[in-house]
């Protein structure tokens, strides 16, 4: 009787491909056994189907069947794989392990593959594999191979590791610069977040202001509706009153005629001649009645009533929109107030500035001062000390009791000597007031409506949007906006108090006024 050999080693139950204990072992037509997954994957990657052990070639892909006897033997002998370390972060994993990846112990620069201890075994056993060059585990081995020579890349220094030192120095510079770059990007994130917060505040304020304006406009529409309804009702009421009065008059005449009929009827049957003649005297004059043939009640005409109401509503809405929107817009731009101090080095020789640089007027006398390239020569202009080249600014100038003035902004490179043409093309965005009215200085000038005497003018500039706007501060309405402006250099607020007038009509100064946002 034959006895079972119970001293078989684990090698007798190992797959020749994964070198691990069989998992669902199947048998090829040549008699060799493999894990179903291993042989299936092996053939998936091959053009021809052959046995990995004996290299027998199959013309068609074999139909694999489970080796039931081998499965029972593996279960019976309780074969287990030897414990090997799993791959840890920073370590190189085995390229052949399926499921739990094990730590690679060597990399083959011929196979371009990294192996754990189990999968490395054929390189120690097979004659052909023994000739392969094994190195310490290398991660992403394919990236370390020369695509031209199909060999592992190696470092060669030029002279005395000179190239290594040069590259290391460059790496040091990069490493030193990285914290700065990181900090710059953190600051940019902070800046972007602050912009979002600011934008949300602006949006909330815009919704609140817009809600107030729209509510006011809705009230105007509701009033128009009520007035329209009242007009129609009054016309109907007038017609009803006319009809009611006529009906009362008719009813009264009917009553009078009925009474007369009652008096006449008995007399028509009397035989008493004396009584008839005596009674007839009081009946010969008929009661007073109207000729009703021409009397009629005309229904009221409503033609044009709605149109007139809508015309009135349009006029009211336009007025209210300008008033309400102007007030809300002015309130928004006033938050960008900047301090404006006039620069005496730029002031025309006729101009007199206050000690604090907040007021300027034409003294009518040319002062003797050293020549200055910054000073205006022919135009009685003066600039603010500080320029700006981004963002938004707002300032207010009192123009009360003046008959002529100019104010706005100008670019840094404007011509300050000789003949000056005050237009946006020449670098000036200014409002001009004189006896001829109010205009935006241009080529040609843009004439603007002036409803009342200006007391204080607000100037708002959005550098990035290319916008210059002017406001009547006291009336809280928008005057004019220059849009689509192209700003490519610093801008300065600019003032001109107008020429000196001997009658004193234009002697008042232009005054830089602090913004009062509670108006």
Image: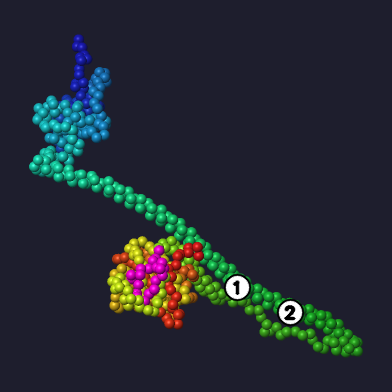
Instruction: Determine which quarter of the picture holds residue 37.
Output: top left
* Dominant secondary structure, magenta: loop
Q: Residue at x 27, y 48 (%)?
A: 180
Q: Quick one: 65 or 333, which is closer to the camera?
A: 333
* In this view, 287 is above or below 327: below
Q: Identify the secondary structure beneath mark 2.
A: helix
Q: Quick one: 158 or 420, which is closer to the camera?
A: 420
Residue range of the region highlighted in magenta in the rendering: 339-358
Q: Is residue 349 magenta?
A: yes
Viewport quadrant of the N terminus = top left
Residue 442 in sight: no
Residue 11 in sight: yes
Nearer the camera: disc 2 or disc 1: 1
Instruction: Determine which quarter of the picture holds residue 159.
Output: top left
Left or right relative to 370: residue 252: right
Choose the circle earlier in sequence order: 2 or 1.
1
Q: Residues within 10 Å of mark 2 (few under 14, many from 20)?
A: some
In the image, farthest residue toward the top: 1
Q: Which residue is mark 1?
A: 231
* Rendering coords of residue 278 (x, y %): 89, 88
Q: Residue at x 20, y 12 (%)?
A: 3
């Amino acid at each position: 009787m034959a006895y079972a050999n119970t001293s078989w080693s684990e090698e007798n139950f190992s797959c020749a491909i994964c070198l691990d204990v069989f998992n669902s072992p199947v048998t090829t037509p040549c008699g060799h056994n493999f894990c179903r997954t291993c042989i299936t994957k092996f053939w998936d990657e091959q053009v021809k189907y052959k046995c990995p052990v004996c290299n027998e070639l199959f013309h068609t892909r074999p139909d694999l069947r489970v080796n039931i006897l081998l499965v029972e033997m593996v279960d019976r002998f309780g074969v287990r794989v030897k414990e090997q370390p799993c791959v840890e972060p920073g370590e190189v994993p085995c390229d052949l392990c399926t499921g739990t990846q094990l730590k690679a112990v060597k990399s083959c620069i011929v196979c371009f593959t990294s192996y754990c201890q189990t999968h490395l075994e054929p390189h120690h056993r097979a004659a052909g594999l023994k000739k392969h060059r094994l190195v310490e585990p290398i991660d992403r081995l394919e990236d370390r191979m020369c695509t031209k020579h199909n060999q592992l890349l190696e470092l060669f220094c030029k002279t005395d590791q000179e190239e290594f030192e040069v590259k290391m120095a460059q790496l040091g510079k990069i490493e030193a610069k990285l914290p700065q770059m990181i900090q710059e990007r953190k600051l940019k994130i902070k800046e972007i977040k602050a912009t979002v917060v600011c934008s949300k505040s602006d949006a909330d304020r815009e919704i609140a202001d817009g809600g107030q304006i729209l509510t006011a406009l809705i009230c105007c529409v509701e009033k128009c509706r009520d007035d329209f309804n009242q007009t129609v009702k009054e016309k109907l009421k007038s017609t009803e009153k006319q009809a009611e009065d006529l009906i009362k008059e008719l009813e009264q005449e009917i009553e009078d005629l009925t009474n007369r009929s009652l008096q006449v009827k008995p007399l028509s049957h009397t035989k008493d001649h004396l009584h008839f003649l005596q009674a007839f005297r009081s009946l010969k004059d008929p009661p007073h009645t109207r000729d009703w043939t021409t009397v009629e009640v005309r229904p009221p005409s409503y033609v044009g009533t709605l149109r007139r109401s809508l015309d009135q509503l349009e006029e009211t809405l336009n007025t209210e929109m300008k008033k309400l929107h102007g007030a809300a817009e002015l309130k928004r731009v006033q938050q960008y107030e900047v301090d404006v101090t006039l620069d005496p080095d730029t002031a025309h020789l006729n101009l007199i500035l206050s000690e604090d640089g907040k007021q300027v007027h034409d003294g009518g006398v040319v002062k003797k001062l050293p020549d200055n390239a910054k000073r205006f020569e022919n135009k009685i202009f003066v600039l603010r000390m500080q320029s700006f080249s981004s963002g938004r600014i707002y300032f207010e100038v009192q123009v009360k009791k003046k008959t002529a003035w100019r104010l706005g902004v100008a670019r840094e490179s404007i011509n300050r000597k000789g003949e000056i043409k005050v237009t946006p093309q020449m670098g000036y965005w200014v409002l001009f007031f004189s006896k001829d009215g109010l205009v935006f200085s241009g080529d040609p000038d843009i004439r603007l409506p002036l409803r009342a005497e200006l007391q204080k003018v607000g100037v708002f500039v959005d550098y990035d949007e290319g916008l210059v706007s002017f406001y009547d501060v006291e009336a809280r309405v928008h005057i004019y906006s220059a849009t689509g402006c192209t700003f490519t250099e610093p801008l300065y607020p600019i003032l001109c108090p107008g020429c000196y007038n001997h009658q004193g009509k234009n002697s008042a100064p232009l005054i830089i006024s602090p913004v009062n946002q509670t108006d």
